[in-house]
Image (cartoon, rainbow, N blue to C red):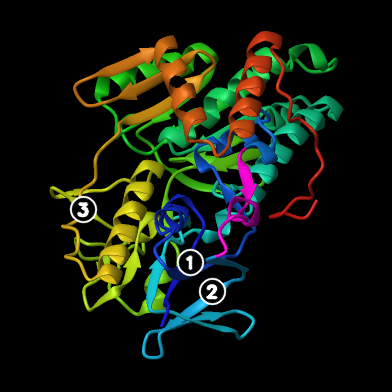
Amino acid sequence: MTRKVVIVGAGFGGLQVVQDLKGAGCEITLIDQRNHHLFQPLLYQVATTLLATSEIAWPIRRLLRNRPDVTTLLATVTGIDRERREVLLKDGGRVPYDDLVLATGATHAYFGRDDWEKDAPGLKTLEDATTIRRRLLLAFEAAELSDDPAEREAFLTFAVIGAGPTGVELAGIIADLAHRILPREFRRIDTTKARVLLIEAGPRILAAFPEKLSAHATRSLERLGVEVQTGSPVTDLGEAGVVIGDKPIPCRTVIWAAGVQASAAGTWLGVETDRAGRVMVSDRLTLPDDPHIFVLGDTAHVETDGKMVPGVAPAAKQQGKHVAAMIRADLAGKPLPGPFRYRHMGNLATIGPNSAVIDFGRFQLRGRLAWWIWGLAHIYFLIGTRSRLVVALSWLWSFLSGQNSARLITQKETLRDQ
């Protein structure tokens, strides 16, 4: 009987498993609640008008059109029946499995203040990106219309909460948008007077990077006009603005980049999770009590040499390769591969045009050369020659013309009625 492999999630990890099981003789079912694979590392560039949605997302069915061994289902998973070995779908359907791979990712976490989401959207999906882009562009338009100086100032104040790579990258491009790209397009406002706040509760930005790279990033952001505020958490926020400690700041556009929460996979399985909801897995990425259920990527709590494996694309792809190798070995009756070991590929973050920081451990880079390496690395991981070419041309156009190409206000608001 053909081995049934069900993969939930078509992100980096899930697609890697599909890729590496080609020719293995499995009957693969890939389930995702969206019809596209998303290149999340560049999602912030959609949110800040640099790239269009189609440049970083690809229809799953098109990617797998030459794989007759793969059935793709556009569906929402609501649970796992471990006794009957079935995946439960929202429409009442059930999908049987012999091996189950959960690669369902994570969403943003508000540390108990979920009511903040409508006023401070996070950035995990294309819908999030287009919502943020809409709010950014409408803020400038609203400021142009307003005759009230205080209201105008609030519309021209932008707050990014959380100073990891995503927060730093967002703040840098918003500042570039306001100070370099938009000034000649408005008549009643001076967009260069826009305030961009990067708010971090911890002592410094880019906490995962060495201190000297963090300090360089801070200086680079400040040269772009970003106000970096560290050491004080946001204590409240709403439509009117944010409160840092006990200081209110009028602000109409707030973006959340401060934390993540794993998907509900741990609840579906009824197993132990960490504080962020990540499933505690064995060193082979399986459940301790079931060697045929694999959990990987942002959904899994994985450690290598006593250190938590970061929730980044290279880690998810490495885990996907390991899971596929485990399934292949089991199918062939061969010894299983050893424990999963993460090979750290380095930390990268861009700070704006012509500046980035890269940490390869002993080897560190900053400035323009780091920016070029960052760009080449991201283009390399894009899917397909056309995508690589289109993104490269979009970046080149922005670099040479001083204009971003994706500045249409089209989509409706997804979180707040307008």
* Residue 62 part of the magenta-drawn span: yes
Helix, strand or loop at mark 1: strand
Q: Is residue 391 above or below residue 328?
A: above
Depth check, front residue: 17 or 31: 17
Q: Amino acid at mark 1?
A: Val
Task: Give whichever of discs 2 and 3 has the lower sequence position.
Answer: 2
- Which residue position holds label 2? 77
The image quarter in which residue 368 lies: top left
* Residue 232 part of the magenta-drawn span: no
Residue occupying the point 86% across, 29% down:
145
Range shown magenta: 56-68
Do the residues under discs 1 and 2 have CB atoms within 8 angstroms? yes
Q: Position of residue 59 (x, y in %)?
A: 65, 52
Q: Position of residue 209 (x, y in %)?
A: 29, 29
- Which residue position holds label 3? 303
Q: Is residue 62 left or right of residue 351?
A: right
